[in-house]
Image (cartoon, grey):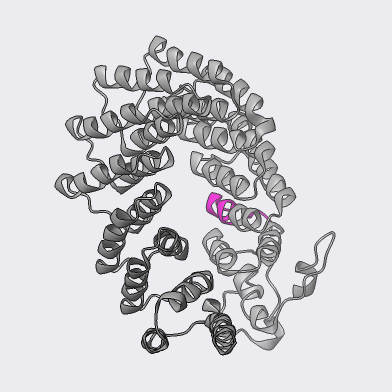
Amino acid sequence: MLQCFLRSSKTVTTVPRSLTSLINPSFLLFYSSSPNPPPNQRQPSPSPIASPTRVLKLISAQSDPLLAKEIFDIATTQPGFRHSYSSFLVLILKLGRSKHFSLVDDLLVRLKSDQYRVTPTLFSYLIKIYAEADLPEKALSVFYKMLEFNVKPLPRHLNRILELLVSHRNFIMPAFDLFKTAHKYGVFLNTKSYNILMGAFCLNGDLSIAYKLFNKMFERDVMPDVESYRILMQGLCRKSQVNRAVDLLEDMLNKGFEPDSLSYTTLLNSLCRKKKLREAYKLLCRMKVKGCNPDIVHYNTVILGFCREGRAMDAVKVLEDMPSNGCLPNLVSYRTLVGGLCDQGMFDEAKKYMEEMLSKGFSPHFSVSHALIKGFCSVGKIDAATEVLGEMLEHREVPHTDTWGMIVPTICEDYETEKMEEILEEVMKVEIKRDTRIVEAGIGLENYLIRKIRNRSK
């Protein structure tokens, strides 16, 4: 009898032996309530007394969503049995998370036909499930499904659907249509609703539509926030309209808004890329006055901008100002500055910041140390080059093979063999890693010394 209960119209589910001890007539169909009746009187009673609460517990306990659906169907066959709304909710969640969307649709039809009172929570879960499955069309259908159930969508439902739709470029216009018609269904747009659409149109290059939406906010008494301004600033900067973005910042400040850190980062980065370094530095100095202390990202952005344009000494000034403003230089700060100084041939200044960098425990990228050593070698300052090499070895930093290949022949030209042995002894104290390929440098040194000895013998 139990086997026929577990047989659906399409499939037969095999139930483990441990489960059959749970799904048995005592849970779903209880045949008699009389204690120990005589054998000749033990006849099954067709009175179903399984409660919706018991069925809910069984469904909730199943990790297999299809088995949970079988239990749901078994209970449905009992005369006069009506599932609790919670059983529908739990089962829909299980089936939705396992992507049995057709079964979810069947349960929604059942909820509608049996006139269950549905809560907005169900639709919040459905939107989340379809978002996780990346199904924008199904998420959009949830909005209209809520209307069918006479459940008024809330702004949070609308916004979550809009977020999913605009994440797909070909669903931006359907999202815009929903945005424009939502008020007809009593759903009022809020600031986040506008921000979602503005961000989508800015990313899509439709800056004019984004600006119209921004102006509509004021017409409809929807107050923009810092994110609203930042979205437009980012859109303007992507279009290389940095002057308009700065004007928008001024408008934002005049209306009493305090730009956040990301807003300043967007403007500083755009100003530096447009080579408006003076304006970028002025903005950096204004930040603290306007209530936003510059952080390491802001400083590093300006340092990089100066170094790219061959103004490394201006970058030095920015770095020196950092501690007094409560921000300490980091690895990126030093690497950028040393590289910029080397590019301008200011090797002595670069060496100073390289040593400061090592003393603070920062590891220079091999390209930075190589550029500095190469620079000293190119101007004949071999002692300074070996000092840099010595500093690196002292701080357990292994130079790259290209650095060895360049400096070893130069040292051999200017130093006696005894001095070279001392240097190599220092090298061997450093942990040798596979990627240093120091053996190749050693082979090159050996070949060089052989050639030198042969030349002397001739």
- Residue extent of the magenta highlight: 79-90
Residue 215 horizontal/vertical position (percent): 43, 13
| Residue furthest to the right | 10
Residue under the point 36% across and 54% down: 338
Q: Is residue 319 a member of the stretch shown in magenta? A: no
| Residue furthest to the front | 458
Residue 413 in sight from this viewpoint: yes
Residue under the point 32% across and 38% down: 261
Above/below status of 73 relative to 19: above
Nearer the observer, 229 or 234: 234
Above/below status of 179 relative to 3: above
| Residue furthest to the top | 219
Please indicate whether residue 95 sits to the left or right of residue 422 in the image.
right
The mark tally for this picture is 0
Q: Quadrant of the C terminus?
A: bottom right
Nearer the observer, 144 or 196: 196
Nearer the observer, 161 or 196: 196
Residue 16 horizontal/vertical position (percent): 70, 80
Residue under the point 34% across and 55% down: 347
Nearer the observer, 73 or 68: 68
Residue under the point 68% across and 81% down: 42
Q: Quadrant of residue 329?
A: bottom left
Please indicate whether residue 209 sits to the left or right of residue 360 in the image.
right
Q: Quadrant of the N terminus?
A: bottom right
Q: Is residue 83 a member of the stretch shown in magenta? A: yes
Residue 156 horizontal/vertical position (percent): 46, 35
Residue 223 in sight from this viewpoint: no
Q: Quadrant of residue 309?
A: top left
| Residue furthest to the left | 324
Residue 270 horizontal/vertical position (percent): 43, 31
